[in-house]
Amino acid sequence: MPRRWRLRNKLLLGLGLVVGCVAALIAGTAFGLSSYMSTKKTVESKLNELLALDELKPHVAAIVSEPTPAAKPASDSDDAIDIDPQTGEVRRARSKLDHARSLFQVYKTLHEETVRRNRDPDPYQDAQLIEEIDKAFAALDAAITAYSGPQALRASKSLAADDAVFRQHQALLSDIDLLRNEVSKDMSDRIGQAGHDFRRSVAIVSVATAVAVMLIVTLVSLFSGWVFKPIRDLQAGVRRVTEGDFSQPIDLQSGDELEDLAVAFNGMTARLHEVYQELEEQVDERSRQLVRSERMVSVGFLAAGVAHEINNPLASIAFCSEALQTRLQDYLARNPHETDVVQKYLRMIQQEAFRCKGITSRLLEFSRVGERRREPTDLAELIQGVLEIAQHLQHCRGKRIIFQPYSRVAAGVCAEDLKSVVLNLVVNALESMEEGGVLTITLKAVGATAEMMFTDTGCGMTPEVLENIFEPFYTRSRTGKGTGLGLFISHHIVTQHGGEIRAASAGPGQGCTFTVRVPLTPALAQDAADRVLPFGKARKPAGLKTEDGIGHAA
């Protein structure tokens, strides 16, 4: 399944959206504050200019004015004949003009500072008006100069009554009023712009706040499904595992690292469950082995006692049957018609007595404690030898045995003990099959062990039989002649070799498989088909098949 969103991408998305909303809030707030500061500085500068113009205008208006009575010279004064009224008026007008120019220069300095600090909304219009005022000052100065000439003296008019001076003076006042109005207009425009910027800032902040609120709600909802719920599911799954519940894996479909973590945890849980099951099986197997060992000890003591107690009567029965057979020669000569019957029963007595003696001998061997000598043994030859013996058994008639040694295998075992195990398994398999049945025997090396598998097409086993198949005196033989000790002793022999024997069956009528594993002699385990065993004998070819019991190597 393709990945949709990694956890890192989800976190980065959430972080990006939050940063975007915060940036919008900061931008709106900063825009409003910037507009406020700009307006404040512009108003401060323009207000200083306006104050300078307000201070300038009265001085400009006073340049040309009617002289006051106090300023007029007295006609009866001694100095009146020496003072020229027009000259004094011109001198006063020039003094006021120079002072007005100095005040206007102060305004221009303030205006230049405003322009330099970029606080003038319309510096071009102000510059034109300033230039016009400079020209008006120059024109007024020229008019005053012209007034003070010979023509003015002849006219004998006051400075305020001079038309040229009056026109230039009024033009200067008009230009100052225009400049003052322009400064006021700049202040009004900047305040209006500040109001517009304020409304825009409020709109930006309001929208950003609404988006931030919706974003927070959305992120909480998304992260609840993206992060919090998967973490809760992981926590619940871990808690189940700690309580020993392995049946319910963690199911996450988040498509991120949390899903990967859940998959890895499920894999670990599955492996842990398998380990627990294996440990339980091992504990169960060890418990069975312990019980089996205790029973084995008990059976060993019982077998030793029974064997010793039965051997003497059996020996007496066998001796008496032989003696009776010798002494009955005369009787049989007189009664020839009973010869066959008597001989038959005597042979049966002898055979069964010696058979019982063989059983007691095996019981005695089983009860003896001690390590049998183990030697490197070619398991293929060992199985081949057992099959050559099995061809003479009655149960082998009409059945086939297929022997497939996949590799040359040699192991350090007690050959006689292992032969008894193989023979017991072969005989049991042959007894469980009807005519036409097939017993398949395979041999191969698996790691450090030799594995022999005996698979038949017989009657199979139920789960109950499989569970108790290696218990002593437990038998379900089809012939009804089993003692229940064959597989028990075989299990004991294989266990003494450090190996294991297992039985498996799909059910009644499905046949069964016995698997025997014994440790290899590492230096003697060979897989190459063209090598010679250390005993000096080559392996027989694979694929042994039997006809009417046992066949020959193909």
Image: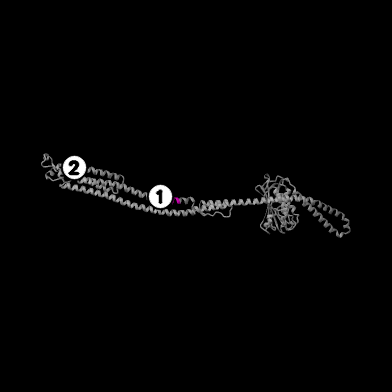
Numbered circle sitting on residue 94: 2
> Chief secondary structure of the magenta span?
helix
The magenta segment is 14-24
Instruction: Tell whether position 218 is magenta.
Output: no
Q: Residues within 10 Å of mark 2 (few under 14, many from 20)?
A: some
- Three-letter code for the amino acid on which mark 2 is drawn: Arg
Secondary element at image label 1: helix
Residue 126 shows in this picture: yes
Secondary element at image label 2: helix
Residue 35, image x and y in percent? 34, 49
Q: Is residue 408 left or right of residue 50?
A: right
Residue 288, image x and y in percent? 68, 51
Numbered circle sitting on residue 288: none
Which of the marked residues, 1 or 2, is nearer the chain's N terminus?
1
Q: Is residue 26 left or right of residue 294?
A: left
Q: Residues within 10 Å of mark 1 (few under 14, many from 20)?
A: few
Judge by depth and name the residue closer to the eye, 508 or 474: 474
- Three-letter code for the amino acid on which mark 1 is drawn: Ala
Whether residues under marks 1 and 2 lie with C-beta atoms below 8 angstroms apart, the answer is no
Q: Pointer 1: what residue?
A: 23
Which residue is found at the position 80% from the left and 54% from the top? Answer: 353
